[in-house]
């Protein structure tokens, strides 16, 4: 990887870190669980890396273990993503506003 | 026309859209009214990111075999994740979140290993330069710690038998430091010789020691500190995903992984602040020998009351505050509590919930349980909101909470809890404490609240006690 690309990637990393801090700083405590569970689902973005890694291994002729490891990575990342989003949605669906007094 | 060139730009464009959706999604997740649409938005971002990688130059050459394998893994994973998410009881939520988080860490670790294997098998896609090697190694370390750490957290939260007793690890700081040093040395070995045998040994050493490190780091941490450690592990799994993006130069991985990492760190710090502890002390200090409170000289017996008498007090109360804690989750009393809350409101009382940020076993644990029982979220107040009004409260009902209402935190400088922000329930005119028995909380710290003059203990299972209070209102 050349130096220019490396610096660009680090740049992206740092900016994203600051953005994340700014985004989260003022979240009411009642939303901590959904926030955690929702961001947890986002950390399943590693599924993108898993798909790429698995596919790269497929194109090589002698990398069966790489394919298997990559495939397992996809599997677990998918559980993280799908499970995470549905659980978060279920939780948020329960948060209700007060109904008008009967 | 250069079809591949066009695809490349399309991929980057789609990654950009996905990243924006993640950012907006997280922002919306932070507000109650928009949280659900925020979650939906970020899931659409995820879908777009996956589509984008599927049409990228990494995947297309893999052909029909590649797509077949990927599709299989995704379908199986989706089914498992979906069923799991639908079936879990709300009380099982903390451990499920921990488990999913562990899977994310595991996946990132495997991605790095798979990248390494591809390089070893002669792929030119993965570089053998120091930057690629170091980030790959860090992915393995962070992913592995997030994985085994989350598994241990899951075991503790699920109440597995082996974790029932507090586990202490003599010299755990030394052990952890040594493990970390060995793991880093492994990365060094790999960076020095990425394609040779030394690199192979390095990768294995790094992976093995990091997996152990996750265990030793989390195993000594007690149940009450779980909200902090879960947020921390969440941050780690995000960071692992971000680092997994470096070797293949994938920006969407870096951006979203890093967003999760940063938000996890913030949440960790919020939790620490709520417990008046620094994160380093939580992670590195062994559990301090808790001395019993200084005021042992004037041991008083707590006053107990029957449900019938408690009802009479409640019936006359105009302003009631309910303080839930982990005990409410254990007794699964949230629905009964909601019923009691309705009865009190019908009776003309004003009812609020005062929820301490670290009540329960994960951040916001109580809010989720009460939301499940249909308690509207406007009634769920933070301790900061409720404390100023506490003097006007007729009855504070404490359900399975202990340390977060311990007045020693305010007035006893010798107490280990001193300085921790608490729900100042002791200032209410009458305090009901619903408790199973006379024991202390998880920290083993004496709670003078129980022997205060305005405090009344109602012993028994929280759910049963609350239900019998409800039936008193009916009769």
Image (cartoon, grey):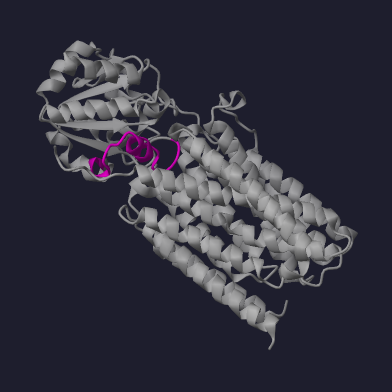
Compared with B348, B365 (above or below) is below
Q: Residue B265 at what x, y percent from top left?
A: 48, 55
In the image, taking residue B132 as reference, residue B394 lies left or right, namely left
Q: Residue B102 at what x, y percent from top left?
A: 60, 45
Q: Residue at x 18, y 22 (%)?
A: B454
Most extreme residue toward the bottom is B1
Q: Which sits in the foreground, B358 or B104? A: B104
Q: Residue A59 at what x, y percent from top left?
A: 81, 66
Q: Which sits in the foreground, B398 or A58? A: A58
Q: Residue B370 at what x, y percent from top left?
A: 33, 35
Compared with B9, A79 (above or below) is above
Q: Find residue B39 and report its image quarter.
A: bottom left
Q: Residue at x 37, y 54 (%)?
A: B35
Compared with B240, B170 (above or below) is above
In the image, taking residue B473 as reference, residue B254 lies left or right, namely right
Q: Residue at x 71, y 73 (%)?
A: B57
Compared with B400, B361 (above or below) is below
Q: Find residue A47 and report its image quarter.
A: bottom right
Q: Residue at x 43, y 48 (%)?
A: A89
Q: Find residue B124 and report its image quarter.
A: bottom right
Q: Which residues are drawn in magenta?
A: B361-380
């Amino acid at each position: 990887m050349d130096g220019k690309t490396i610096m660009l990637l680090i740049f992206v990393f740092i900016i994203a870190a600051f953005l994340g801090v700014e985004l989260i700083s003022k979240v009411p405590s009642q939303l901590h669980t959904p926030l955690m569970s929702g961001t947890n689902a986002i950390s399943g973005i590693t599924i993108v890396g898993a798909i790429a890694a698995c596919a790269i291994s497929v194109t090589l002729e002698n990398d069966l273990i790489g394919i298997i490891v990559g495939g397992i990575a996809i599997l677990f990342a998918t559980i993280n993503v799908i499970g995470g989003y549905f659980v978060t949605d279920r939780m948020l669906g329960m948060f209700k506003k007060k109904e008008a007094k009967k | 026309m250069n079809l591949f060139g066009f695809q490349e730009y399309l991929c980057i464009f789609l990654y950009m859209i996905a990243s924006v959706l993640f950012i907006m999604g997280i922002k919306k997740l932070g507000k109650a009214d928009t949280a659900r649409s925020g979650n939906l938005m970020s899931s659409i971002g995820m879908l777009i990111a996956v589509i984008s990688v599927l049409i990228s130059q990494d995947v297309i050459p893999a052909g029909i075999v590649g797509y077949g394998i990927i599709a299989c893994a995704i379908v199986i994973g989706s089914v498992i994740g979906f069923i799991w998410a639908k079936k879990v009881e709300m009380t099982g939520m903390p451990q499920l979140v921990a488990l999913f988080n562990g899977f994310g860490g595991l996946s990132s670790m495997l991605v790095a290993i798979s990248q390494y294997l591809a390089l070893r098998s002669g792929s030119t896609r993965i570089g053998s330069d120091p930057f690629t090697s170091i980030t790959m190694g860090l992915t393995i370390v962070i992913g592995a710690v997030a994985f085994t750490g989350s598994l241990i957290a899951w075991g503790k939260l699920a109440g597995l038998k082996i974790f029932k007793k507090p586990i202490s690890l003599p010299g755990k700081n030394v052990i952890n430091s040594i493990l970390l040093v060995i793991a880093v040395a492994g990365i060094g070995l790999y960076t020095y010789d990425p394609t040779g045998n030394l690199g192979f040994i390095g990768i294995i050493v790094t992976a093995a020691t990091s997996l152990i490190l996750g265990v030793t780091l989390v195993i000594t941490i007690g149940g009450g500190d779980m909200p902090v450690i879960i947020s921390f592990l969440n941050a780690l799994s995000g960071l692992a995903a971000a680092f997994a993006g470096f070797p293949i130069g994938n920006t969407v991985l870096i951006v979203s992984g890093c967003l999760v990492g940063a938000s996890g760190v913030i949440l960790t710090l919020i939790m620490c602040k709520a417990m008046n502890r620094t994160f380093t002390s939580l992670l590195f200090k062994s559990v301090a020998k808790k001395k019993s409170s200084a005021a042992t000289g004037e041991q008083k017996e707590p006053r107990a009351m029957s449900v019938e008498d408690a009802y009479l007090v409640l019936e006359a109360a105009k302003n009631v505050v309910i303080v839930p804690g982990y005990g409410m989750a254990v007794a699964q009393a949230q629905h009964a509590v909601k019923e009691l809350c309705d009865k009190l409101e019908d009776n003309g009382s004003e009812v609020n919930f005062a929820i301490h940020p670290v009540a329960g076993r994960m951040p916001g644990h109580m809010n989720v349980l009460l939301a499940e029982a249909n308690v509207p979220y406007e009634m769920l107040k933070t301790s900061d909101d409720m404390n100023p009004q506490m003097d006007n409260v007729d009855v504070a009902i404490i359900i399975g909470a202990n340390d977060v209402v311990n007045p020693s935190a305010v007035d006893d400088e010798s107490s280990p809890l001193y300085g921790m922000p608490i729900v100042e329930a002791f200032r209410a005119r009458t305090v009901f404490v619903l408790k199973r028995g006379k024991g202390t909380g998880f920290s083993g710290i004496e709670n003078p609240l129980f022997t205060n003059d305005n405090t009344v203990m109602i012993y028994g299972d929280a759910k049963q006690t609350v239900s019998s209070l409800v039936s008193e209102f009916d009769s």
